Image (cartoon, rainbow, N blue to C red):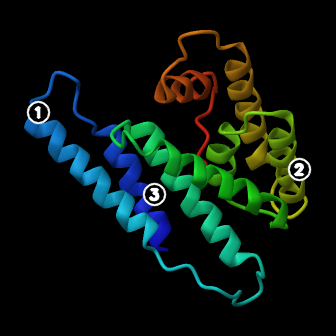
Amino acid sequence: MILTRLLSEAIDAISAAPPASSSPAEISSYNEFIKILDWKIRNVTIPDTASGSNPDKPLILEFYRLAMLVYLDRASKTQSGHRAKTQKQIGRAFTIIPKLGSCARQFPIFIIGCEARNDEQRAMVLDLLERTVKCVDSRKFTHTRLLLQAMWAQEDLAVGDRMDYGERLSSVISCCRIMPTFM
């Protein structure tokens, strides 16, 4: 699946980010790569109609793509000026959540769930998790629920200087005795 390959590329790109002490040319090259990756993700063709046994497939693919774009933007910190675009993607993802019967992939639920800023959005994410565990092995989603609740607690407790996105993710995920896979 092309989205899975692109997610792998995005994760590799984030983990290979040049340090702040890198030369301007290295940083510029990295930023250009992130822009190209963003373009590739945005331009993946999502079918308009469902095929096979899953009528939610186009919505799930769109939800997955939006989560990837949000993750790439937040974690790379290279796309300054795209804040409005990212907020629009987050808004679109939250309009998709109530339409989904379930979402067997943890990654988009976790990434979009981390963007929930109020009780209504958090309830939507938890409701999607509940619908999903009825269809999928619920043990996979236990970590997702706990990690989301930890992220929300950090968000609620943040005052003044907020922790960097990557630092928040690392802080919360590092509390797990077993690394969640999200895939």
Instruction: Tell me which numbered mark, 3 or 2, is placed earlier along the sequence.
Output: 3
Residue picked out by circle 3: 7
Left/right placement of residue 19 relative to residue 37 reads: left
At 73% from the left edge and 27% from the top edge, which residue is drawn?
Answer: 152
Quarter holding the C terminus is bottom right
Looking at the image, is 12 positioned above or below residue 173?
below
- Assess disc 3: are there few (<14), some (14-19) or many (≥20) residues with their C-alpha within 10 Å of its C-alpha: many
Q: Please identify the residue farthest to the top as the structure is shown.
A: 160
Rounded to the nearest angstrom, the CA distance separating label 1 from label 3 is 26 Å
Residue 159 falls left or right of residue 74: right
Residue on which disc 1 sits: 24
Q: Amino acid at mark 1?
A: Pro
Of residues 89 and 113, the one nearer the viewer is 89
Q: Nearer the viewer, mark 3 or mark 2?
A: 2
**Earlier along the polypeptide chain: callout 1 or callout 3?**
3
- The location of residue 158, given as percent across then percent down, is 65, 14
Q: Which mark is residue 152?
A: none
Label 2 sits on residue: 127
Please tell me which of labels 2 and 1 falls first in the chain. Answer: 1
Amino acid type at image mark 3: Leu
Measuring from the top left, give residue 143's x and y in whole percent: 73, 38
Nearest to the observer: residue 93 or residue 153: 93
The three-letter amino acid code for the residue at tag 2 is Asp
- Say which element carries label 3: helix
